[in-house]
Image (tube, rainbow, N blue to C red):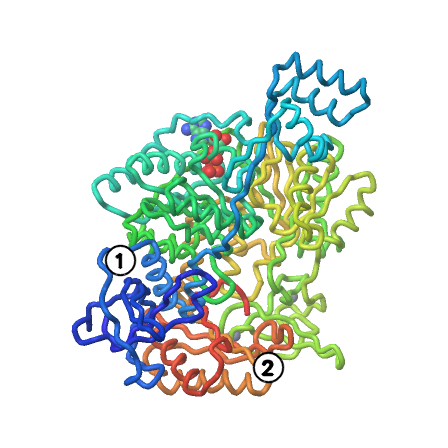
Amino acid sequence: MTGRFANIIVDISHEKVDRFFQYRIPEALMGHLDVGMAVMIPFGMGNKQIKGYVMEITDRAEYDEHKLKAVDSIVKDGITAQSDSIKLAWWIRENYGSTMIAALKTVLPVKKKLKQVVRRTIVCKVDAKTAAAKADEFAKKHQSAKARLMQELASQSVLPHTLVTGKCNVTNKTIQALEKAGLIEVQAEDTYRKVLPENIADLEGWKKKRLSDHQNAIVDSIMQDFKSGVRGTYLVHGVTGSGKTEVYMELIEQVINEGRQAIMLIPEIALTYQTLVRFYRRFGERVSVMNSRLSAGERSDQYERAAQGDIDIMIGPRSALFTPFERLGLVIIDEEHESSYKSESMPKYHAREVAGELCRMKNASLLLGSATPSIESYFRAKKGEIKLFTLNERLAGGQLPSVYVEDLRSELKSGNRSIFSRRLYGLIKDRLEKGEQTILFINRRGYAGFVSCRACGHVMKCPHCDVSLSEHTERYRNVSRLICHYCGYMIPGVTNCPQCGSKYILGFRAGTQQIEELLHKEFPAARVLRMDADTTRNKDSYEQILSQFACGEADILVGTQMIVKGHDFAKVTLVGILAADMSLHAGDYRAGERTFQLLTQAAGRAGRSALPGEVVIQTYQPAHYAVVHAANQDYEHFYAEEIAYRELMMYPPVAHMMAVLVLADDERAGAVQAGTLAEQVKQQFGDQGFVIIGPTEACIGKIKDIYRYIFYIKHRECQMLTTVRDTLEQTIQKMQWSADSVQFDFDPMMNY
Ligand code: ADP
Ligand code: ZN
Ligand code: ZN
């Protein structure tokens, strides 16, 4: 890496990275320094020699160049875990566009100097018989607390301190008195904060399975590569229940046997207690888990344990990727199509892509798994960049459910205006009579203000972008407009369907609450649970609702996409998807993909046990390819149509797309800023295969008084977009706009 100056951090910890110092690179070291290297530098008034890390190499002097001190030397063997973190941060900065500081904060754990947790136990110093006798003695003297504790210790000679002071309600004073009397002893030991459930070791079940031939073939193929030094990227395409997790566990075990460590990413919402138990049964204390419910102290402990090599496996969501394993050999990303793997704040990195780079750095293999692979990964598999494996059978039994697609247009024609089609209504009634359970699912996602015709199914779309238009109503004047959120194309609201002339052309709105109310009206005896953002606001309500439903405390569960993941309910034999159109017309290029995934997963909720399942998909567009292929659980054909659409419209992964989001306090200033940047791209790059869409007001035009403008740039080569971004970053700097007033997002997964 060339450049005349090095930006160096002296103290690399999450809180300290805001401050870096610039040094001159002396002639002798020119061309030898690299990001992440440890160097010795003269520091402070006395020019004391200290160690620092090179964070950036640049040709731009931040200060008067003659006043800069020079780097002294390179530290031999200075490649540490920290160097790797810095290198990864640099890669993230380069690829997603953010400040180096933001990138570093992403990869470095928050390190809080916290006291280690002390675990105290109370140990009985006398035998059980004596303890019982003492208990009687205390009881006679009406010293009930002492009696209680001795009684407990008579049956169990060691008790956790917290149990004694908590549940048994014994004060510290009483404990001290008994200790003085020589009856008990309080013992203390330092421990890391435990993040696995307390009773996990006592749980039964999950014996190691003998793998099927198909499973073995996958493990063998990947391990053969591994042992011969080949590190690849692999994708397991297999329906839920086809044995992917067993494959992951076997691979992890073999990789550990090779002396390496493993990270397994899993979306937080799918990281169930059952999964943890399963891994714990197999790997015991060598496995740890990371999730957003952990405190800063617990997180920092987990990182510490990983860095010291006390654990071999880390399971967790996106951020678990930054576990500082020295000997990382394998990264697994389960449910790799999930949008939660993409960060929504700067830097807007995708965990799958960062994992790719991490594996390259660490010489590790990357395994992706999904029942509905992302179009990106499948595209790469087709190109031969990813080795593809397929698992077709459900191993734990249970047949695939029967799926009915109900055409809501014909319901309207025959006079049914309810949210429930006649078939769904009949099946719900049937399940209530049989005492079986139903899940009703409304896939409301992000912003869906699309307008469609109830009579013919026609959807108002942007002629330039082939995505659905969104309805905006100006509250004061009560006029409605239809707007494209990619390009800003706008037409007045319509009162008649341009296709069939019907007046039933309306914005689509339906929520879980409405459905719940309707259920109460139609089926007064049914017990209904509702799960959505409103009912899961506090920490444990999500688990609570699910376990209530699992225990059979309700007949019907109504919910958003939250309920499709992970959980197995043996008595659910009916799944109703009320309006597949909600996600079909979300107004972005991933709408079809997301619908296919949601429908496939939702359908997979029915008939997980011996009872056969049925699925009803209600839609105004029964012929839409995402609906048709989801109903048939036919990924291949879905992929073929989806990739053709992406090809035609130049959407990722065929081409690449960069969103440029401009944030401003002032409405006009924001519009001008976005206009300036978009214009610059047109002027400077316009004729080199770029497509520029917008600028326009963002889908959500204002958040917390900050105005939002957006434009998109498409190009076949990702590298070209990076070049544009660099140019825009320079402009932003030159114009002295603040660095966080413009955000970049590559191949966006959300609507702005
Ligand atoms: P997935 O991760 O694809 O959903 P799992 O690995 O969880 O699939 O397997 C689904 C079920 O099948 C589990 O109950 C698991 O114990 C069982 N299973 C997986 N592999 C085997 C096998 N080789 N033999 C018997 N049962 C298996
Ligand atoms: Zn119509
Ligand atoms: Zn458009």
**Image: 685 above or below 443:** below
Q: In this view, does 426 lie to the left or right of 564?
A: right
Circle 1 crowding by C-alpha within 10 Å: few under 14, some 14–19, many from 20: some
Residue at left offset 32%, top offset 44%: 329
Disc 1 designates what residue?
78
Disc nearer the start of the sequence (2/1): 1
**Image: 398 above or below 727:** above
| Residue 163 in view, yes or no | yes
Residue type beneath disc 1: Gly
Q: What element carries label 2?
A: loop
| Residue 630 in view, yes or no | no
Q: Is residue 519 left or right of residue 254?
A: right
Nearest the viewer among 324 and 656 is: 324
Q: What element carries label 1?
A: loop
Q: Distance between the residues labelled 2 and 1?
A: 45 Å
Residue type beneath disc 2: Asp
Disc 2 designates what residue?
665
The x and y percentages for residue 13 are 43, 60
Nearest the viewer among 277 and 474 is: 277
Residue at left offset 54%, top offset 31%: 200
Residue extending farthest to the top is 129
**Image: 112 above or below 272:** below
